[in-house]
Amino acid sequence: MSLTVDSVTKKFRRFPALNGASFVAPQGSFVSLLGPSGSGKTTLLRILGGLEFADSGSVRFADLNWLDMPARTRNAGFVFQQYALFKHMTVADNIAFGLRVRPRNKRPSNADIQKRVTELLALVQLPGLEDRYPSQLSGGQRQRVALARALAIEPRMLLLDEPFGALDAKVRKELRADLRRIHDHAGVTTVFVTHDQEEAFAVADLVAVMKDGRIEQYGAPADVRRNPRTPFVSEFLSA
Amino acid sequence: MTNFSNGRSGSRRRSFLKPTEDPLWLKLLLGAVTIGFIAILLLLPLALVFKEALAGGLGGFWKSITEPDALASVRLSLIAAAIAVPLNTVFGIAAAWAIAKYDFRGKTFLVTLIDLPFSVSPVVAGLIYVLVFGMQGWLGPTLADHDIHILFALPGIVLVTVFVTFPFVARELIPLMVDQGRDEEEAAATLGATGFQTFLRVTLPNIKWGLLYGILLCNARALGEFGAVSVVSGHIRGVTNTMPLHVQLLYDNYDYAGAFTVAALLAMLALVTLALKSLLEWRYADELAAAHRH
Ligand SMILES: Nc1ncnc2c1ncn2[C@@H]1O[C@H](COP(=O)(O)OP(=O)(O)OP(=O)(O)O)[C@@H](O)[C@H]1O
Ligand SMILES: [Mg+2]
């Protein structure tokens, strides 16, 4: 059930955003994608989530030909940088969305959905906010709701695109600790995009440093820090 | 440099007005001109329409309205609108969806095409259909062989009404949906929603007020269109005359009471639309502002 990304390429018009990105992540691992702006982190993550199509290369996950599946059947929870919460729905309805759109025979009963929403709100430490609207929440609270919403579908993969980008340092630290706890609890495979190397190294099992649409170095945080393989990586890490 | 700063201090001493503030006499003049224009060009004629319509008392008004040809024109206008408005609503949503949520070649061209009915004179719009469906037109003889009547019949009237009111819903929705981006739709897809579920549960609630607004404008125009319908209708009294055409016919026949009565009815429909529109604007100012920011 590991995730294997093999030589994925993607061009926008003629501009190559991904240039053969490859990495392998064991089942249940937490991978951070790190790299300068424009290096292709978001593009790679969106391809994993089914929101963008790769030009070539392959992705296998849980023995599935991942790129042939539409986003909605991948069961991969996606957390967006700008939250992308449903503005016109309450927190409870946001979190319940993924359960309510299931086909009738797989849809939990209303009581079960309600129970699940309560559990998830407790998990992201926002108990009692069921009836608020997204506009009535702080940035950190919105991001927690977005996380709860992604977790509600019991995802097999969790994809996060700079989810804490808009938050201050203290909240970021809190949230990333929560995220790691939730990741361990849910047993998913997580890919986490971040600008912040301190964050990437603190939270992940594996770090991928990206440059120009390629993965420049990939390995355990301690290894990457101790042995930067190219001048770019050592420069990037010391910046 | 020295000159420049001298000039600045000079002008500062001279004027106590804010840079954007005009003198009082100018404000009064502009206000008076505006109000005068509105009164003379808009309110007065509207008031006169109602006054003339009621010249024969309420009884006369009622008699003119229930006259069979007048009723037929009301029915025809309502039928044409009842077909054109839903069609253009569906089309407008589909076009706005495609333009806002997908990238494809020729997008700008499509937007320009959608605007075409706004820039083409309605009479020309009508003539296009005569060229296509008329007896001298491309399809006319074939259709006549099969006993299908487009011109001088309901289908033609509906067609030109659809053409003329084509842009209203799409124009209203495109900026709104572009503004909202694709984030929520993408989130819905990753959560397992089908395209249709996403549309019903995410997109539609986000655009509903803009959509309603567009439908109102579309409806107002569908009921009021004169030029294009006039070309294809054939003016058969009680059969192919819509309300605006019937007004003209009554007027040309010196039946002023009748003409003004039907006109008053049309004006009333317009006023109801206007009231609903104002209500929407007042109640949902924020969401509509997002639609007009571009
Ligand atoms: N929809 C698009 N159309 C055209 N070019 C795009 C598109 N999306 C991304 N790109 C380009 O592809 C490259 C990679 O973009 P991507 O968003 O993956 O970078 P990133 O690593 O996430 O950067 P950041 O850290 O700034 O978010 C960039 O040069 C970007 O300009
Ligand atoms: Mg990015």
Image (tube, helix red, strand yellow):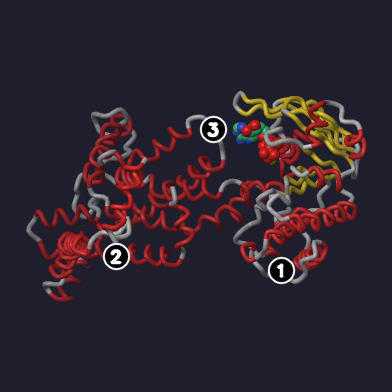
Q: CA distance from mark 3 to mark 2?
A: 40 Å
State which chain disc 2 sits on: B
| Residue on which the image places disc 3 | B104
Q: Residue lying farthest left?
A: B254
Q: Residue at x 20, y 52 (%)?
A: B245
Label 3 crowd bin: few (<14), some (14–19), many (20+), radius 10 Å: few
**Residue type marked 3:** Phe
Label 2 crowd bin: few (<14), some (14–19), many (20+), radius 10 Å: few
Q: Nearer the viewer, mark 3 or mark 2?
A: 3
The residue nearer to you, when weighing B19 against A5, is B19
x and y, in percent, of residue A88 in the image: 60, 61
Q: Residue lying farthest bottom?
A: B58
- Horizontal side of A77 relative to B187 (left or right) equals right
Quadrant for residue B219, please give it.
bottom left
- Horizontal side of B139 relative to B211 (left or right) equals left
Relative to B248, say whether B113 is above or below.
above
The residue nearer to you, when weighing B271 against A122, is A122
The residue nearer to you, when weighing A140 against B244, is A140
Local SS, label 3: loop
Does label 2 lie on the same chain as label 1? no
Relative to A59, say whether B27 is above or below.
below
Does residue B59 appear in this view? yes
| Residue on which the image places disc 1 | A130
Does residue B261 appear in this view? no
